[in-house]
Amino acid sequence: MKKQLHIFFTALMFYTRIPCPENIDHNPDYLNKASRYFPLIGWIVGGICFGVYYLASLVFSVEIALILSMITGILTTGAFHEDGFADVCDGFGGGWTKEKILLIMKDSAIGAYGAIGLVLLFLLKFQVLYNLVSLPQTCNLQSAICNLLLFISAHSVSRLAAVSIVFTHQYSREDASSKSKPIAQNFTWKEVIGASFFGLLPLVVLSFFQWQLLLVLIPVFIARFFLARYFQKWIDGYTGDCLGATQQVCEVIFYLSIIGIWKFI
């Protein structure tokens, strides 16, 4: 149990800015095992984002509450995944060879493709969240509880989609220039089962009240499939930035899919 707590806190320290015990560091062995808890981190981030949204909505408009929630999510993770999304936009937008794409993604400066991509991503995420919380909900739960489960599920499922690429594809960089490389080196069935359990559990709980919500997994993992194939085609695998981009894209697709399910099913 003590070792598992250490691995969990390693994941929490790596994927968020939440303070952790002083004895936690970037131990490569624990960091490699931390992938099993990546979707569990989504529970925490999603819960914090919903908490800020709910409390802010008691005082401000829905629009302001959602913006504050989005800001909170970025501050909680240190824009970890958004930075990866921007780097992928720059790398694949401006590079035409594997070497050039990887070089651009390694550059800490943000380019035109990354800036445009982030603006569009945030606009789309805000709009779908606004539509999501404004829809009449039919899951037979209190609205706040239903939205809490949806926020958590979006973050956990999208993180499962991202980390699953580690289980099926090879890490692209041959050097040790990325701090994400230890995650890519080795994994066991424990990482696969752990990530799947924490990634799917919130959505499974929600589906007890409306089973059709499970259909959201289809578009999310279709997007994951095509993203992974695209990365494989151009850079022969993935990088940490690719995982961050996958998480962001799949999170938005999750919201879009929920809206579609509630409107047409």
Image (spheres, rainbow, N blue to C red):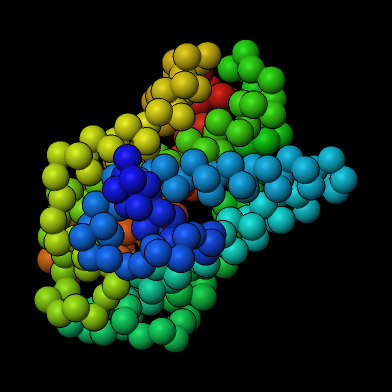
Instruction: Give the quadrant of residue 55.
Output: top right
Is residue 95 in view?
A: no
Image quarter where the N terminus lies is top left
In the rendered view, tell whether residue 241 sits above or below residue 207. below
Is residue 99 in view?
A: yes
Residue 246, position as x, y percentages in the image:
35, 55
Residue at 85 percent across and 48 percent down: it is 60
Count of numbered labels shown in the rendering: 0
Relative to 193, is 94 on the left or the right?
right
Question: Along the line of sight, which residue is nearer the eye, 226 or 217?
Answer: 217
In the rendered view, tell whether residue 177 sits above or below residue 7. below
Residue 169, position as x, y percentages in the image:
14, 55
Question: Along the line of sight, which residue is nearer the eye, 242 or 43?
Answer: 43
In the rendered view, tell whether residue 194 sits above or below residue 82. above
Residue at 47 percent across and 60 percent down: it is 21
Relative to 16, is 103 on the left or the right?
left
Residue at 47 percent across and 21 percent down: it is 205
Residue 2, position as x, y percentages in the image:
33, 45
Instruction: Give the quadrant of residue 221.
Output: top left
Residue at 64 percent across and 57 percent down: it is 72
Relative to 16, is 178 on the left or the right?
left
Residue 56, position as x, y percentages in the image:
79, 47
Q: Residue furthest right?
A: 59
In the rendered view, tell whether residue 224 sits above or below residue 245. above
